């Protein structure tokens, strides 16, 4: 089978399609014929040798923390998933490949109406946003500011907070403002003058903040007078400690993912696929994500 492998850290050119043995599932595992895999900013950091802080990285490495595909083999003791099931799931690495092994408790059923490229790029943004919104206890009637609202995490956070009854202000470039409005947010442009623009959009103040952009967004949130205990970041972990704001971390789970997939299936959550590349063009996909701009997720597809 083909897997996109890195054998040393570096730029996108290090992502090389390689022929490797197709793996066999062990006890409790399933083998998934991967149809789609999301490309996350963290994949670029790992490729460059800069992360993540919470997982050991050994080379050669196949990147990719989220995927969707068809179960084509099951190991001993697997009862909840069967050959032929269409699933999506989460992992640490291994998804930029035609096949991957995964513990059977890290996949959930893909709804028939969920396209492969949506399924393959769903879990990281949706689960991270849920963890953030829950940790920050975003509540009905509150005003929630989402920095980087057009990204995969931000767009999910906007929608989840709207479902909780919050008013949501979200930052993005002007080109993404109609998209943010379609998700139910009040869009605001980031950059110089951000604090004044947010004050104009939220004359009664901001109660709670998710930073998915970086330290400048945290500083702006502090300038807005938001209680530091209600400012959370998924980006600037070191600065979070220095500035006294919250570092948002959580453990992904199939239970949470199934609930989010259910919201998608009933039309209550939407995702945007920014662009789709063949698996062999993973380097081009990384170069697109490396721009740091755009709506939603970049996705690799097989076949
Ligand atoms: N800690 C965790 O568990 C965790 C999990 C997932 C992601 N993350 C991190 O969270 C961040 C967002 O992830 P993602 O997957 O949502 O990324 P993404 O889909 O690539 O989106 C990035 C977004 O950032 C926006 N942006 C760029 N510069 C900005 C700025 N100065 N202010 C506000 N928005 C800005 C872009 O919007 P425009 O096109 O409008 O510029 C784009 O929509 C990344 O740094 C990622 O590594 C952390």
Image (cartoon, helix red, strand yellow):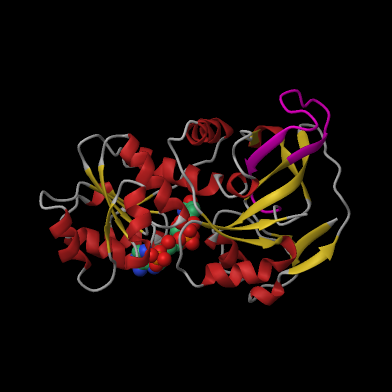
Residue 101 in the figure: left or right of residue 236: right
Report the residue at 31% width, 40% height from top. Answer: 162
Q: In this view, does 158 lie to the left or right of 32?
A: left
Q: Residue at x 60, y 36 (%)?
A: 113
Residue extending furthest toward the top: 79
Image quadrant, ligand 1? bottom left
Q: Residue at x 45, y 68 (%)?
A: 293
x then y, percent, for residue 232: 33, 51
Side of 15 where 42 appears, left or right: left
Whether residue 173 is visible, yes or no, is no
Q: Where is residue 179 in the image (x, y as percent from the top left)?
A: 38, 55
Which quadrant is the N terminus positioned in?
A: bottom right
The image shows a total of numbered marks equal to 0
Magenta-colored stretch includes residue 54: no
Q: Residue 172, relative to residue 252: is it above or below?
A: below
Relative side of 15 to 231, left or right: right
- Confirm whether the magenta stretch covers residue 74: yes
Specify start and end residues of the magenta stretch as a single range: 70-94
> Quadrant location of the C terminus?
bottom right
Q: Residue furthest left?
A: 203
Query: Looking at the image, can residue 271 be seen?
Result: yes
| Place of residue 13 in the rendered image (x, y in percent of width and height, measured from the top left) | 69, 76
For residue 94, above or below residue 109: below
Decide whether the magenta segment is chiefly helix, strand or loop: loop
Image quadrant assignment for residue 199: bottom left
Could you tell me which residue is drawn at 83 percent across and 32 percent down? 75
How far across and how far down the image is residue 195, in percent? Answer: 19, 64
Res 102 quadrant in image: top right
Q: In which quarter of the image is residue 197?
A: bottom left
In depth, the one of 174 and 19 nearer the eye is 174
Q: Name the foreground residue: 252 vs 160.
A: 160
């Amino acid at each position: 089978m083909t897997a996109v492998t890195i054998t040393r850290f570096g730029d996108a050119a290090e992502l090389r399609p390689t022929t490797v043995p197709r793996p066999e599932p062990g006890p409790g595992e399933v083998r998934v014929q991967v149809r789609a895999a999301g490309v996350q900013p963290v994949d670029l950091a790992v490729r460059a040798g800069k992360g993540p802080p919470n997982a050991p990285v050994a080379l050669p490495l196949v990147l990719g923390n989220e995927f969707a595909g068809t179960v084509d083999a099951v190991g001993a003791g697997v009862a909840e998933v069967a050959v032929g099931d269409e699933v999506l799931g989460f992992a640490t690495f291994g998804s930029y490949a035609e096949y991957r092994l995964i513990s059977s408790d890290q996949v959930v059923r893909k709804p028939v109406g969920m396209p492969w490229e949506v399924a393959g790029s769903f879990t990281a943004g949706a689960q991270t946003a849920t963890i953030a919104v829950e940790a920050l206890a975003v509540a009905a009637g509150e005003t929630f500011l989402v920095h980087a609202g057009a990204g995969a995490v931000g767009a999910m956070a906007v929608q989840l907070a709207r479902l909780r009854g919050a008013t949501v202000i979200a930052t993005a470039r002007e080109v993404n403002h109609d998209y943010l409005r379609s998700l139910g947010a009040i869009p605001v442009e980031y950059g110089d003058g951000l604090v004044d623009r947010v004050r104009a959009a939220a004359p009664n103040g901001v109660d709670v903040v998710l930073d998915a952009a970086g330290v400048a967004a945290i500083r702006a949130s502090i300038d807005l007078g938001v209680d530091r205990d209600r400012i959370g970041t998924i980006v600037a972990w070191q600065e979070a400690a220095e500035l006294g704001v919250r570092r948002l971390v959580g453990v992904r789970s199939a239970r949470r993912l199934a609930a989010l997939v259910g919201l998608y299936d009933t039309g209550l959550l939407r995702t945007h696929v920014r662009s789709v590349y063949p698996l062999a063009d993973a380097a081009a996909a990384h170069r697109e994500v490396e721009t740091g701009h755009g709506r939603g997720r970049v996705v690799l597809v097989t076949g």
